[in-house]
Structure formats: C-alpha cells, structure tokens
C-alpha cells in the first residue's frame, strides 16, 4: 500500500486547486471572445479586399470607356464643325451644299447617340467609384476595429498571464517537498482525468466524480491508516480524507 504523510495529502489539494485554476485560465485565454471577433473581422476584410480589387479594375475599365466615348463625340463634333464652315462659306454647287446639309443631319444624330453612350459610361463609372469608396471606407472602419479588438485581446492575455504567474508560484509553494510518489501519481491521474487527479472526500462522496461511495468502500477507506493513499473506487482519483 502506497503511503504519504497526511499533511502532504492535504497539501495536494492546494496543488490541485492551483492546477485547476491555471487550466481554467489557459482555457479562458484560448477562447477569449476577442479571438473569434478578430477571426470574423479578418474574414470580412478579406472579402472587402476582393471587392476593392474587382471595383478598382472596373473603375479602370470604365474610365477608359468614358475617354473613348469622349473622343468619339469629339471627332464627330470636329467633323460637324468642318462641314458647318464649308456650308457657311457657301462654296460649291447647290448639290454639294445639300449633301453637306444631309451629312450634318446624320452627324448630329450620330453625336447624340454617342453622347448617350458617354453619359451611360459616366454614370456607370460614378456608381463603380461610389462602390469602391464605400468598400474603402468599410475597410478603414474594420481596420480601426481590428486595432481596438487586438488591444483588448492583448490586455486580456496580459492579465491572464499575470494571474498564471501568481498561480504558478502558489503551486510551487504547495508542491514544495511534497511526497514525490504522491505527486507523480497525482500528475498521472490529472492527465487521465481532465485535470483533476485528487479530490476530497465530503459526506461520503468523491468531489472528483461526485459519486457517493458505497458503504463498504467508504468504511474501508475511512478505516484505512491516515497516511495510506486511497483512491476513489468510481473514478480512480486520489481521495483526500478529512480535508
Ligand atoms: Zn471519484
């Protein structure tokens, strides 16, 4: 039968308490709400990045389309002016002048069509530029949010790390010169049982698994020598009596 001084068995519960609090704090640090928020913000920023790339390309295409439409209108207008000057000069036969008049009508219609094209391209450019500006604005707002949440996360991590240092010291004090075999058994059980390797026996129930021991097991445990290391019949954890 393995034994350990009663005082060491009691002190093991302090070690257990420190280990459990450290485990909870590490879990808290790994699951900080800011981590999920940052992940969500990063996904939204990635979407916006794609959006901005697409809109930037669209704006470039539309700017070229507007320029081309302007050039088309301009060249028709230049031709109209040339024809108009010839018409005004009155040079040429009546038939020539009539032909010029006819061409001017065709050119006016053509310019009107091209101006419609130009206007439409300008409207589409304006809409694309507005969408791009909005995506840029949203990106800036999200980046500000990322900076804020990151600062929050860092502060939370710092606070937890400080607590962990304090708990580590506490654990060190509680475990100092503790019976080595008892501590080794505890560490092994803690590993196997989700962080709880030792529990107190309260009112006939193991505080590790919260099962009430049957009368026979309980009597055997209570009657065992105080320095004997006893284990819960249900979960196998070290049971500390009279704690
Ligand atoms: Zn148990």
Image (spheres, grey):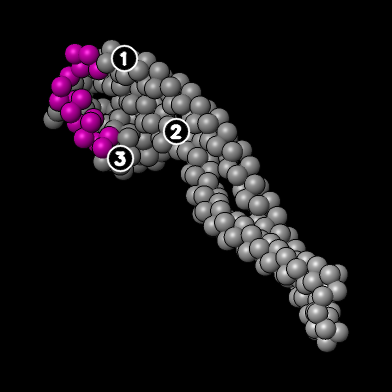
How dense is the environment of label 1, judged by Cα within 10 Å: few (below 14), some, or many (20 and up)? few
Q: Nearer the viewer, mark 3 or mark 1?
A: 1
Mark 2–mark 1 CB contact (< 8 Å): no
Membership of 178 in magenta stretch: yes
Image-based side of 90 in relation to 191, left or right: right
Return the residue at label 3.
Answer: 193
Who's the residue at 45% across and 33% down the image?
28
Q: Compare residues 121 and 37 and report the one nearer the observer.
A: 121
- Mark 2 or mark 3: whose residue is earlier in sequence: 2
> Which residue is tagged 2?
28
Alpha-carbon span between mark 3 and mark 1 = 24 Å
Question: In the image shown, does 36 or 111 lie closer to the viewer?
Answer: 111
* Residue depth check, mark 2 versus mark 3: number of the one nearer the observer: 2
Q: Nearer the viewer, residue 91 or 29?
A: 91
- Where does residue 159 sit, x and y in percent of width and height? 45, 21
Which residue is identified by label 1? 169
| Image marks 2 and 3: residues in contact by CB distance under 8 Å | no
Point out residue 115 in the picture as x, y percentages from the top left corner. 76, 67
Magenta stretch contains residue 100: no
Q: Taking 136 as reference, is 216 left or right?
A: left
- Point out the stretch of residues depicted in magenta: 174-191
Mark 3 Cα-neighbour bin, 10 Å: few <14, some 14–19, many ≥20: some
Crowding at label 2, few (<14), some or many (≥20) Cα neighbours within 10 Å? some
The picture quadrant where one finds residue 67 is bottom right
Q: Position of residue 235 (x, y in %)?
A: 30, 42
């Amino acid at each position: 039968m393995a034994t350990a001084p009663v005082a060491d068995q009691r002190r093991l519960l302090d070690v257990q308490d420190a280990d459990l609090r450290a485990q909870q704090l590490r879990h808290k640090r790994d699951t900080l709400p800011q981590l999920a928020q940052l992940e969500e913000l990063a996904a939204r920023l990635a979407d916006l990045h794609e959006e901005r790339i697409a809109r930037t390309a669209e704006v470039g295409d539309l700017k070229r389309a507007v320029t081309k439409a302007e050039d088309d209108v301009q060249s028709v207008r230049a031709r109209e002016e040339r024809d108009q000057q010839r018409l005004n000069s009155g040079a040429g036969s009546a038939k020539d002048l009539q032909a010029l008049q006819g061409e001017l009508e065709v050119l006016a219609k053509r310019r009107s069509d091209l101006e419609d094209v130009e206007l439409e391209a300008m409207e589409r450019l304006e809409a694309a530029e507005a969408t791009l500006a909005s995506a840029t604005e949203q990106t800036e707002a999200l980046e500000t949010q990322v900076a804020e949440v990151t600062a929050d996360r860092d502060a939370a991590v710092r606070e937890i790390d400080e607590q962990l240092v304090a708990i580590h010291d506490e654990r060190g004090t509680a475990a100092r010169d503790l019976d080595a075999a008892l501590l080794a058994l505890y560490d092994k059980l803690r590993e196997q049982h989700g962080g709880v390797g030792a529990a107190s026996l309260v009112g006939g129930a193991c505080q590790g698994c919260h099962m009430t021991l049957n009368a026979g097991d309980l009597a055997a445990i209570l009657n065992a020598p105080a320095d004997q290391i006893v284990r819960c019949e249900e979960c196998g954890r070290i049971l500390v009596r009279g704690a």
